[in-house]
Image (cartoon, rainbow, N blue to C red):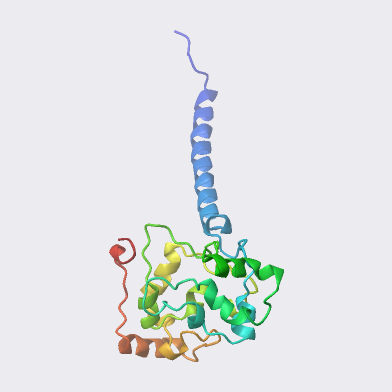
Amino acid sequence: MSQIFKPSTNTLARVSMFGAIFFLAILAWVLVTLNRSSLATRQGIVLQQPVPFSHDHHVAGLGISCLYCHTTVEESSFAGIPPSATCMNCHKLIWNESPMLEPVRESYRTGRPIEWTRVHDLPDFVYFDHSIHVAKGIGCASCHGRVDQMPLMYQAESLQMEWCLECHRAPEMFIRPRTEIYNMEWVSTDQETEGARLIADYRVQSKLSCSVCHR
């Protein structure tokens, strides 16, 4: 009986198998790279907003505290978005006829909130509490970056789980005195030593259980 397959078929089969493995490896690398890219995380991307609010101007330029606008950050899981009335405390008097601020004035007149585009948007399966992080000595800049240097707000970090775990595994490398929570320029002269002391003072535990964030 004559041979059905030629000897070269073995070579073709081996090449096909190795080619498939190589293709799957490349595909996995591409998917992982895309998952870490700004296309997926939105890191570093400035999103369109109804009003071009500048943290650089208001925080660094005017010295307005984070708590003036984000009033619930110390007592709630949400930092809170200020109502238009907060903006109008100043803008009744300054820039009160600027076309750029018409959405703020309209919101104030009608009582309808401005529909801001959310910059830091965690998945629904992730639970994050601002108040506990502030109470334990995690500064605004640790998660949100130097907002005092942002003419337009963007997401400074990836917000992916590995980024969260970096802090949860070694909180002493990120913790700061509670008096410096809102100080964007604060830098420790000896983070490891001071962090270890603050860990003990604030009774911080390294929370790595899945149920801490996924509830």
Instruction: Name the foreground residue: 73 vs 7.
Output: 73
When asked about the image quadrant of residue 172, the answer is: bottom left
Q: Residue at x 53, y 37 (%)?
A: 19
Q: Is residue 187 above or below residue 41?
A: below
Residue 102 appears in the rendering = yes
Image coordinates of residue 88 in percent, x first then y, are: 58, 77
The number of callouts visible is: 0
Residue visible at 52% across and 24% down in the picture: 9
| Camera sees residue 136 | no
Quadrant location of the N terminus? top left
- Residue sitting nearer the eye, 120 or 209: 120
Which residue sits furthest front? Answer: 109
Relative height, residue 23 to residue 88 (above, below): above
Q: Is residue 54 left or right of residue 178?
A: right
- Residue at 42% of width from left, 68% of height from top? 164
Residue 91 image-quadrant placement: bottom right
| Rendering quarter of residue 97 | bottom right
The image quadrant where one finds the C terminus is bottom left
Is 69 left, or right, of 128 in this rendering?
right
Q: For this rendering, which residue is in front, 189 or 107?
A: 107
Residue 166 percent across, percent down from the top left: 42, 71
Q: Position of residue 187 (x, y in %)?
A: 52, 87
Q: Where residue 125 appears, x then y in whole percent?
A: 37, 57
Lateral position of residue 96 relative to residue 2, left or right: right
